[in-house]
Image (cartoon, coloured by chain):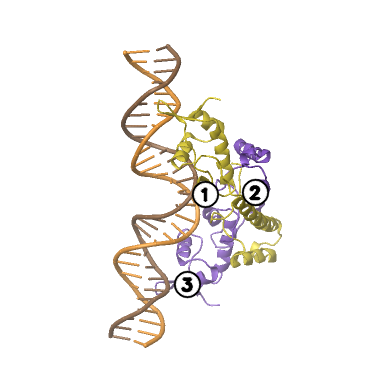
Chain colours: A purple, B yellow, C brown, D orange
DNA sequence: TCTTGACCTCAAGTCGGCTTGAAGTAGGAC
DNA sequence: GTCCTACTTCAAGCCGACTTGAGGTCAAGA
């Protein structure tokens, strides 16, 4: 398969070209060369972008992901790191489950105000005590389908 | 219970005073008055902060949370919104579960390189197709214990 | 040959949720 | 009465992951 134009990569990976340029700047991907001004990429970049997307959705930062590629470009993913991330996701999943159940209860609860519902107050208590924490603070985050 | 000084609220809610000022600016909380320059808060603010923390961990933005308080200060949480958020969390949880299993497999997989593992490649394929998405993009996010 | 338009560079902007820093003030201990 | 210290205001900064805008270049089609 011949090299792909940046536009083609963008189309296939469903990623804007600006993002590809940004990733290149960060050292996550590299064009094989240029045709005129235009970047050309080895088709393998698609796999790499998939790897990046996977890492992102698992909660790794771009910098962390960059460190998972050896200088030769091949992934050198530390299995321990993966296992740790899986454990982290596991905790996150359990916490989200509790939260989901709480929300469902609050949604179904017949108390006139949520503040009058014992269950809701219990959840609040947990929130106060820090048993429930805020996403985006160096922890496992979820995924989405926009 | 008498009013609480901002420092006391910060201590009890485990939130920096700067955050309380920021929340006030956003209209999320309001002091009952001042003693000298210092803000004084009704103890009920603790419950309200708990509600805010809970909302944050469920993935609501501060603006969304602000809209959940009626002008009189009482929460007016739409049960449908809660149910929707619960459903969203449910989807997130399922996706994270798949991801966790995938990570565990990759961690345990004996293939010399992850790219040579069929399972890993299948996951990558899913990532490419968009079946796995990135957190932080208007979707349910997870929780954490920093 | 000329035009078109998709790419290029580089700097700056965006977004959410705060934090930080400089400069000011007042309550309470001495 | 004075001092300390914890508060105050306001503006600016930070983080990550990109996006946007202005001005420039060049391959390909008419």
Q: Is residue C19 left or right of residue B129?
A: left
The subunit carrying tag 2 is A
Residue B108 location (% of width, % of height): 71, 56
Disc nearest the viewer among 2 and 3: 2
Disc nearest the viewer among 1 and 2: 2
Residue for badge 2: A107
Name the element at disc 1.
helix
Pick the front one: D4 or A21: D4
Q: Residue at x 60, y 56 (%)?
A: A143
In the displayed orientation, state which residue is furthest to the front: A112
- Are discs 2 and 3 less than 8 Å apart at CB? no
Residue for badge 1: B64
Point out the image quarter for the C terminus of chain A: bottom right
Pick the front one: C2 or A3: C2
Q: Residue at x 56, y 25 (%)?
A: B1
Distance from disc 1 to disc 3, alpha carbons, whole Å, reads 37 Å
């Amino acid at each position: 398969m011949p090299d792909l134009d940046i536009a083609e990569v963008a189309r296939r990976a469903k990623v804007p070209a600006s993002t590809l340029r940004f990733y290149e700047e960060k050292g996550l991907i590299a064009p094989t060369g240029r045709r005129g001004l235009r970047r050309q990429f080895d088709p393998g970049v698609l796999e790499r972008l998939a790897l990046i997307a996977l890492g992102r959705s698992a909660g790794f930062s771009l910098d962390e992901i960059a460190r998972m590629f050896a200088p030769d470009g091949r992934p050198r993913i530390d299995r321990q790191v993966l296992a740790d991330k899986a454990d982290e996701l596991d905790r996150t999943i359990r916490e989200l489950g509790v939260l989901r159940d709480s929300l469902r209860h609050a949604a179904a609860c017949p108390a006139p105000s949520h503040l009058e519902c014992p269950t809701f107050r219990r959840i609040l208590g947990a929130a106060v005590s820090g048993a429930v924490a805020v996403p985006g603070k160096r922890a496992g985050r979820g995924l989405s389908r926009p």
